[in-house]
Amino acid sequence: MTGPARIFDRPNDAIGKPLPRPDAARLATGRGRFVDDIQLPRMVHAAFLRSPHAHARIVSIDADAARDMPGVVGVWTGADMADMITPWVGTLTHMTGLRSVPQYPLAVDITRWQGEPLAMVVARSRAEAEDACDAILAELDDLPAVTDTETALDAGTPVMHDGFDSNLAFERVVEAGDTAAAPGAGGTVVERTFRFGRHTGVTLESRGTVCDFDPGDGRLTMHYSGQAPHMMQAILSKHLDLPEADVRVISRDVGGSFGIKIHTYGDEIACAVAARALRRPVKFVADRMESFMSDIHARDHVVTGRMAVDADGRITALEIDDMTGIGPFSMYPRTSAIECNQVLNLTGAPYAIENYRARGRVVFQNKAMMCQYRAVGHPIAMAVCDGLLDDAGRALGIDPVDMRRRNLPPDDSYPRASASGMKLDDLSQHACLEKLVQIMDLPARRAEQAALREAGVHRGIGFVSMVEVTNPSPMFYGIGGAPIASQDGAVVRLDAGGSLHVASSITEQGQGTNAILAQIAGGVFGISPGNVRVTTGDTDTVPYGGGTWASRGAGIGGEAMLQAAHALKGQVLDVAAVLLQADAETLDIRNGRVVDADGGAERMELADLARLVYYRGNELPNDLRPELIATRHHRVTDFPFVFTNGAMAAEVEVDTDTGFVKVIHVWAVEDCGRVINPLLVDEQVRGGVVQGIGGALYEECLYDAEGQMLNTTMADYMVPMAAEMPDITVAHVETPTRTSVLGAKGAGEAGTGGAPAALLNAVNDALAPMGASIWQMPMTPERILTALGRL
Amino acid sequence: MNREITLTVNGETLTHSVPVRMNLVDFLRHEAGLTGSHVGCEHGVCGACTLMVDGATVRGCLMLAVQADGTHVTTIEGLSDSGRSGALAAAFTARNALQCGFCTPGMIASAVGYIEGGGTADRDAVRAHISGNYCRCTGYQSIVDAICDVIGGDTP
């Protein structure tokens, strides 16, 4: 028998293979089971009256008329519901200094963003609930709205929260070395102010829940479109004062999440409160306008960056000052300071930089709440550093690829720490960069670019070298007191028919979680993945764990599955050894059969072994105690995160008359450690790149000065559609992490984290011959034309 | 206010009394139990509710149920059960042209319209055709690949 560390020494017919997802056919034939597909007996529907003002005092809410409307079974104002639940505060002890104020499901006394729920109506149909919302009279007194991030801390700006001395939520400074030193003769200093617009996730399936309370057994069941069932179980338990064991959270098919569906939303929690009060199931599914106004937003950073480089193009100092607006509260329980914190941690982290200074300030404002969305902090950190790097390269006349070659640490120099203190290991920055240059045929691209410039066509090519936070340890949230598991569990069971049933605490939102779990279990155990059934997303039936977020599913949940499958294999072979009167060390499991390890001769069908154990135990020796089930858990130790890396390039064409940017092609080389399924990971990287293109070129939550969001429809908030998107070439360098046997790091956020920087650099490469540059995203036609001096 | 409608859905004749303000996709999902058509935006942009009415590709959210009185409606369930979308479903699986799967029924319904209308395997043309269908998970590339595979006869 091979030990865990040697699993990959022998051929493997499952892990690493481009196998189609077993559940794809179900989804492609319309047999998905999403939250809004759930119909329960006596189910009623919720709708919310939401604040039309960004900031207002609630004078009165008269809901009497609504209570008499057809079909209405329950109406609650914020004041009503405040007595039925305890409030939450989005702070964590390790985010030193972070402050927020208690938050209820529905606003009490003051409403602080346009779209905040003020009152809830539950009725027989959603339409009747909405009718009744229209009959509620809310008297609101406008208060001055704090909307501009950059002036939120000014003396003349009203302070939003009573008892606070300013609108500051969090501040952190990172200092390493001496950033004041001059770059030396022949060097240069570049300084730019970067602006990153607010984005939101725009999951195609909007947020939703069906909450069901059974007074018979006192249990609350939440059907949840989300990423962290056990976290939500703990939150419902705490704030509805129910034992954790009496809260079940079920997450079946989830129609996109991207971090949007991992937070505590008042409207969803209110459904649990209402279900308990009404003793019947309550469904709420956000409509698209509600999604835009109440889903978390992200980014919204203004960063001043300054980089000094010596005459050889080597970075001698990097300074950044980041300011970000998070809405009126810090989101619960992960907090809204994490993105700023990540910007400080990650800016410059790909490069060998000794002198680094960063300040981050997080401010309250009267806009929708901001929190973790795919690639938290990465697009900002990468765009700032790589944008400055190329700016400096242009000043010195050094090619962008050479700038990276000179500043990326040697691939054999790991483990090492970034200037911000991040522990980095098993990275392959140079290998990824060289592979990128090769697959894109850079000399041909440059030649074509030069020829087209002669013809008046303005193409640009931009690069990014990035690091990416994956596989977080308990140092991410658990250390700060959040009820968020950092470890994950796996159960592997051999059934009587000879197939495996596995369960895992990581969740499926389309990444292919269930598929890779089957591949890992099958590959390690010795059975076709097609004979592995997978259960995820149910706190009653899966091991305890964190779920899928922060690119942790494959790396942490996958390793737990590997260990469990390996353990079960040993247990099964111990039984087989007794039955076959052989030494377990001489046996193996291949293709669903017990075989001789040496030579592969078939000894026994797994189904025969399982049936003997389950049905005819009388034939077994009495001292044999077969366990055809195994459980293992995994957490990351020694590192706060398992960093990974990648390199990307984008080619764009800028129309200098209209300001439109056409993306010609994107190339992405990603090192996510061991690739479990290239078919799945490649398209996941592409999807991430497209989301990054969206942020770089199109997507922005627009607000007016009074805090009214102006583009709350999908016709107005521009997301990438197929016609604007390029083909994207994906390649891999595989450097397995030594923190696990599986060796997998995350890949889910690479594209979104890196693409904006590559796009920014590509556009600036196109604009450079005209002496123009742009440092704001999204790079809309208006902003491009402004940069060109044409507006 | 309700009105009685009779329509044929996936070959079955249904008679329902529906509120006049109810849109077609809500009727199909919540009254007829056909939850394969999805609701993403309710204003005709995202394409998740794409289905067929009397042979035409339509948005189920932009048509009222009462407007479908007397029509023949085909949803993803009908396309699948009849085998009409079988090659597309197989190609979407083979190419991993779906992740969360929420857009997929509408995407496939649009692709059926494109292919049955004589659409070619020209990648730009395919991209243009499905640009009324929003997918947040894939990079669209695998969807284009899958549709081109079916047109080219490269069905797995």
Image: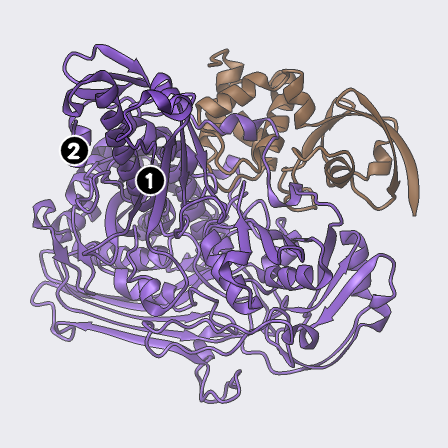
Residue at 14% x, 53% y: name it: A407
Labelled disc at residue A453: 1
Colour mapping used in the image: by chain
Q: Which amino acid type is shown beneath numbered disc 1?
A: Arg
In the visual, does A673 lie left or right of B36?
A: left
Q: Position of residue A399 (x, y in %)?
A: 19, 47
Q: Is residue A537 above or below residue A326?
A: above
Asked if one can make out residue B36 in the rendered structure from this viewpoint, the answer is: yes
- The answer to the question of whether label 2 and label 1 lie on touching residues, with beta carbons closer than 8 A, is no
Tally of numbered discs: 2
Residue at 18% x, 24% y: name it: A584
Q: Position of residue A74 (x, y in %)?
A: 77, 64
Considering the numbered disc 2 on the image, is that residue within a helix, a strand or a loop? Answer: loop
Labelled disc at residue A3: 2
Residue at 9% x, 48% y: name it: A410
Question: How would you rate the neighbour count of disc 2 (Cα within 10 Å): few for under 14, some for 14-19, many for 20 or more?
Answer: few
In the visual, does A177 lie left or right of A79?
A: left
Q: Earlier in the sequence, mark 2 or mark 1?
A: 2
Which mark's residue is nearer the viewer, 2 or 1? 2
| The one of B26 and A667 positioned closer to us in this rendering | B26
Q: Which amino acid type is shown beneath numbered disc 2?
A: Gly
Considering the numbered disc 1 on the image, is that residue within a helix, a strand or a loop? Answer: helix
Chain identity for the colour brown used in the image: B
